[in-house]
Image (cartoon, rainbow, N blue to C red):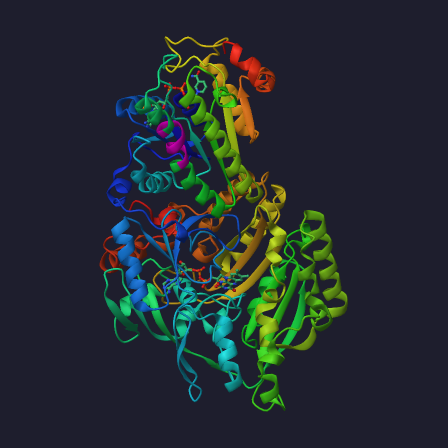
Amino acid sequence: MSAISQKDAVSSVHNGVPDSAAGERSAGVALPLDRLERVAGWGMAVGGMGYVYRPSTIDGVAQVFEIARRTGRTVGLRGGGNSYGDAALNSENIILDLTRMNRILVWDPSNGRVTVEPGVTIQQLWRYAIGDGWWPPVVTGTSFATVGGCAAMNVHGKNNFKAGPIGDHILEFDALLPTGEHVHCSRDGNTDLFYGMIGGFGALGCFTSVTLQMKKIYSGWLNVDAISVPHMDGMLYELDARKGQADYLVGWSDAFASGETLGRGQIHQATYLAPGDDPYPAQSLRIESQEIPANLFGFLPASIIWLFMKPVLNDWGTRLTNLAKYMQSATLGNHKRYRQSHVAFAFLLDYVPNWKLAYQPGGLIQYQSFLPLATASPVYREILARSQKRGVVPYLGVVKRHRPDDFLINYSVDGYSLALDYKVTGSNRASLTALLKELDRIVIAGGGKFYFAKDATLQGATVRAFLGEERIRKFGALKERCDPESLLQTDLYRRLFGDQ
Amino acid sequence: MGAALAQNLARRGFRLGLVARRAEELARVAAEINASDGTQAFIYPHDVRNYDAIPVLFQSIVRQLGGLDLIVYAAGIMPQVAPNEYDFEKDKDILEVNLLGAIAWLNQAAVRFDRAQAGHIVAISSVAGDRGRSGNPAYCTSKAALNTYLESLRNRLGRKGVAVTTLKPGPIDTPMTQGKPVAGRVTSIDQATAQIVAAIDRRANEAYIPQQWKFIMYVIRRIPSVIFQRLNI
Ligand SMILES: Cc1cc2nc3c(=O)[nH]c(=O)nc-3n(C[C@H](O)[C@H](O)[C@H](O)COP(=O)(O)OP(=O)(O)OC[C@H]3O[C@@H](n4cnc5c(N)ncnc54)[C@H](O)[C@@H]3O)c2cc1C
Ligand SMILES: NC(=O)c1ccc[n+]([C@@H]2O[C@H](COP(=O)([O-])OP(=O)(O)OC[C@H]3O[C@@H](n4cnc5c(N)ncnc54)[C@H](OP(=O)(O)O)[C@@H]3O)[C@@H](O)[C@H]2O)c1
């Protein structure tokens, strides 16, 4: 007898015979071995093997659905793979990678409307449009995310309090459903699918083209203010108080600060330049003016250099850099104003190649919770304090101000989000998982929500608690209509919505 | 040996796929494993000589397990062969089960582990592969060839983070040895399993089971052919 085995048994119920679901699906066809690849979440803490297909046309996408049917597999859609956890993984099944569907189809510089294939990245988009004076209306912290991936997660930027999620700027889209149906969705037609597929984490259908309304800008520069805040309440107060005057707001928080200074950090506030403020917009709007040069440190404002000291990624190294950073902004940099390019302000980390490798070998888990105004302060203070008490302290905390939106799968709040990067190691994995479970309960009790793009550890019950039965039922009905065979699945989908 | 190893690995939290020809026997072993909480084994009746079925079966097993960390090839046969017997059909069978089946299965695992840059391949060979003894030429050949195949795999995959372990048991108290004359003391299945698991844990390149055989075979491998011919081993 030969035994082949997988470590870390999951404790599911079983009857000792091959389960029927797998049995039915495993038709007698093997997938080609040359498709087999290791695919990991961006945070490197979760990963698996999958059969990766990279079509370049809509027909190619349809063919992958057919292959899945024939071989009894499921299909997980994947864009740039920037989701931190398992949202774009589909272990032992097919992964449909859309990065080769990356053409910009229609661009109208007179009104800023752009229609793109789903694999076009935010980077491609800004580079294409900036020379005409347009900028993506919502961008994520990395420019390597694709428009399809951003639409599927309904991503937010540092302007969420003002601009809403990216879905608020999507005018229309086309999608191919697993049934083979091509649908066109907007606020006027197929509205249920419009509000369901945006944010629908790739579980309903595959975007094949997306039309966005870009944002007019009059300069390649932003006016940036750095404001230091002494504790979490100061952070939340400033983020709220400044939302009328700012176009972008983000708070960096030192998660090691405790006691009186718990949650202390620095806020970066940015505003667009008005027409005429920049005497040479044609120059500042060139790609060359936007890109961060190789001599990064000479160019960056001092207030953010600390971010790059993070390769000193152990508790004491982080403590010191966080403290240095705080002291620096408190003494020198407070209310310092400078100009920064859109790219430097939005995608700083993209210009430090592979900074995340400092988190190897265990990777990182980002824990982002969204809390309403009323409960954010006590919940965030509790989250930080518990992490410190358990000795599992995140190395970076990012705070943003949010506003509600109308999409079905919804993580929005009139409140704040706090995103914490926890380093995963062989020895802290268990205690980290236990800590995050505790934190889940605290967040839910505070009326909070979670975001699938950042998630690696939630449980189905938690998701039901914050989405509510009504939304889950509606989503289930859409799933039944778009994908009755449940062909579209990911590891995250099975983890949170499995066996439904 | 495979069954005993499965029980042991299940207790340590492995999720298992068990492959052999006899479905009832597989079901019995799996039922024992699944009787305790939190352990899980699935069964796949299969004859390793059915090479064409292997790619599909391998993929569906791995899918059902949700991934693969370790593969152990433990299938093997050692039919009785008389000192003057030269039966090609018998010999062919031995090579098919002990060698070709191993290559067919482990090639699948090798591709996957190569891409994953991780994994562990283990096969049960035998001390019989260290010398061409008079008793069972095809059996010795099958194990010697298996050793070489595994060494090649190790040299291909070792630098990619994949371990390849060649296990070389001496006589072990299993159905294979029952009623057969064996050279030397027979080791209990429990002791053999414990040592196999230890070798797997330390990701050994090669391990004799039990360890004493390492020294015995060290000597035996060095006996010159002219003398070896005259010995009755
Ligand atoms: C450094 C960094 C900073 C980040 N900052 C932010 C931030 O500020 N705000 C924010 O909201 N997020 C942020 N994220 C998360 C990231 O923006 C989202 O995970 C986003 O979805 C990634 O896009 P992607 O193309 O990489 O998609 P993937 O991660 O590959 O996929 C995301 C989801 O989209 C689905 N999908 C992909 N393509 C399609 C398609 N064509 N049709 C339908 N579904 C599809 C996938 O199935 C999956 O569910 C950040 C991530 C990183 C690594
Ligand atoms: N026992 C010893 O003294 C000893 C010493 C050195 C090396 N070994 C080696 O150790 C390994 C295990 O031997 P063992 O002692 O455990 O022998 P065993 O008790 O006879 O077990 C052999 C196993 O191989 C399976 N098998 C045989 N032919 C097969 C086929 N065609 N397809 C699929 N599975 C097949 C059998 O299951 P089914 O019959 O149900 O298929 C059984 O589970 C063998 O490679 C053997 O050569 C044994």
Left or right of B11 on screen, residue B217:
right
Determine whether B106 is above or below A215 in the image. above
Q: Is residue B97 magenta?
A: yes
Determine whether B216 is above or below B150 in the image. above
| Of the pair A91 and B21, the residue shown nearer to us | B21
Identity of the residue furthest to the right in this view: A331
Prevailing SS of the magenta stretch: helix
Left or right of B139 on screen, residue A294:
right
The picture quadrant for ligand 2 comes to top left
Quarter of the image containing the N terminus of chain A?
top left
Left or right of A349 on screen, residue A114:
left
Q: Position of residue A157 (x, y in %)?
A: 50, 68
Residue B114 can be seen in this image? yes
- For the point 49% across and 17% down, the residue is B192
Q: Is residue A159 magenta?
A: no
Q: Quadrant of residue A284?
A: bottom right
Determine whether B227 is above or below A499 in the image. above
| Of the pair A203 and B190, the residue shown nearer to us | B190
How many numbered dots are placed on residues in this image? 0
Q: Position of residue A355 (x, y in %)?
A: 62, 58
Q: Position of residue B77 (x, y in %)?
A: 37, 21
Report the magenta residues as a range: B96-103
Q: Position of residue B126 (x, y in %)?
A: 48, 22
Identity of the residue furthest to the front in this view: B226
| Of the pair B35 and B60, the residue shown nearer to us | B60
Residue B1 can be seen in this image? no
- For the point 36% across and 60% down, the residue is A202
- For the point 51% across and 42% down, the residue is B118
